[in-house]
Image (cartoon, rainbow, N blue to C red):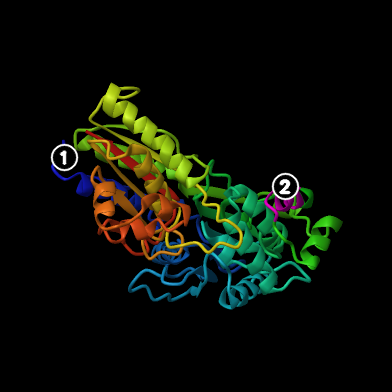
Amino acid sequence: MSPDPRGFLRRLYDVAVASALPGQVLAAHLPPPPDPKKGRTLVLGAGKAGGSMAQALEAAWPAEAPLSGLVITRYGHVPPGFKPRRLEVVEAAHPVPDASGLAASEKLLALTKGLTADDLVICLISGGGSALMSLPAPGLLLSDKQAVNRALLNSGAAIGEMNCVRKHLSAIKGGRLAAACAPARVLTLTISDVPGDDPAVIASGPTVADATTCADALAICRRYRIDLPPAARAGLESGAFETPKPGDPRLAGHGLIMLSTPQMSLAAAADAARAEGFAAYILSDEIEGESRVVGGVHAALARAVARHGQPFAKPCVILSGGETTVTVDAGRPAGKGGRATEFLLGCALALQCEPGVYALAADTDGIDGVGPHAGALLTPTSLGRARALGLNPQALLDAHDSASFFEPLGDLLVPGPSFTNVNDFRALLIV
């Protein structure tokens, strides 16, 4: 057994994140520049990894080859020391869009004017781009998009459902950016943060044809009781907000390369665990559902291993990824927390101090919800220590205030922005 379960779990998280850094994976997938006498290279992008993707591209692109463009990333997510020389990097708000993101998106779309068939457009897309690349559909205001975004985030909707609505209320997502680039050749380099790695869902697929419809978006809003602004409802009901579909000739011949995925990062962490002498098992990189419920299911599995050696023998590490959700009751303010800490608190209450079970859950972008923590660590003593401090774990869970459970214990994980994003990372150590 590792003499330091906390340090061991943190090392696995660090390995998972490092394996997805753009500086490690982007350069090998860059195409040759177009003939400078005929065409140019334009870079467009958005996402939490946007700053580091821009940095990696600038470093690898030939100095003599022309390069220009604009990338939008989250506030605080530009790598330290990176001073863009040929690309413009703009910071904006996430998860609710702001005026900075709106202005940057308008400028980004305007850059597509005048492109020719001899030009190359490289699109750098990563998770978070849905909020960062926010350009409302005609007739909608930024305030409309903000209201719908907030409602979706609190609804419990899965990421694919949220992004179906977002792309239909957008003037730039759901394949519209790629359509605007026609007739130029478009290559999308993407880092996946969604279960199943569907490129049409990552950042709401700005360069990918969209198979969903306005009717699908309306059905999702009805299912989760999302109150749509009148202009948004009218655009969806009339079909005016329909997106480019598979087979659209404007998107013909475009390429897409998946640089990093949750599965790749989980595999890297599993290899690191095995190198330290532990058996490692990956449950899935596509786990969705309510965070607290998923935490309880993971706890049941850990107990089965700890008590019965089933389905795995201890000592071992169990890894999983995906994107869970936190459903906030309407009209009830939520406390401090996020998907990762709510998962862990649900796990803690189900484990009830089970000996020999440790866990780490964190978002690979370095921010769990609104942060500043990425997640937390759970030990067999966590519940006892919290109760000794007068905390009520169940009440904190019910109030979606899970960070307030881990913070007094000194068990929040605060690594800062990672400059990549392959979504939730969870590791359970059973010894």
Residue 271 position (above or below residue 97):
above
Q: Secondary structure at mark 1?
A: loop
Pointer 1: residues within 10 angstroms few (<14), some, or many (20+)?
A: some
Residue 145: image x %, image y %?
A: 67, 67
Specify the amino acid type for callout 2. Thr
Residue 298: which quarter of the image? Answer: top left
Task: Out of 41 and 419, give the one closest to the viewer.
Answer: 419
* Most common SS among magenta residues: helix
- Indicate the position of residue 47 as horizontal and vertical percent values: 51, 62
Q: Is residue 51 left or right of residue 175?
A: left
Q: Residue at x 39, y 76 (%)?
A: 83
Q: Which residue is mark 2?
A: 212
Estimate the spatial distance between the alpha carbons at disc 1 and disc 2, rounded to whole Å.
Answer: 48 Å
Q: Return the residue nearer the eye: 415 or 240.
A: 415
Of badges 1 and 2, nearer the viewer stands 1
Q: Which residues are magenta?
A: 216-225
Q: Is residue 341 left or right of residue 305?
A: right
Identity of the amino acid at label 1? Answer: Ser
* Relative height, residue 289 to residue 363 (above, below): above
Q: Residue at x 28, y 61 (%)?
A: 408
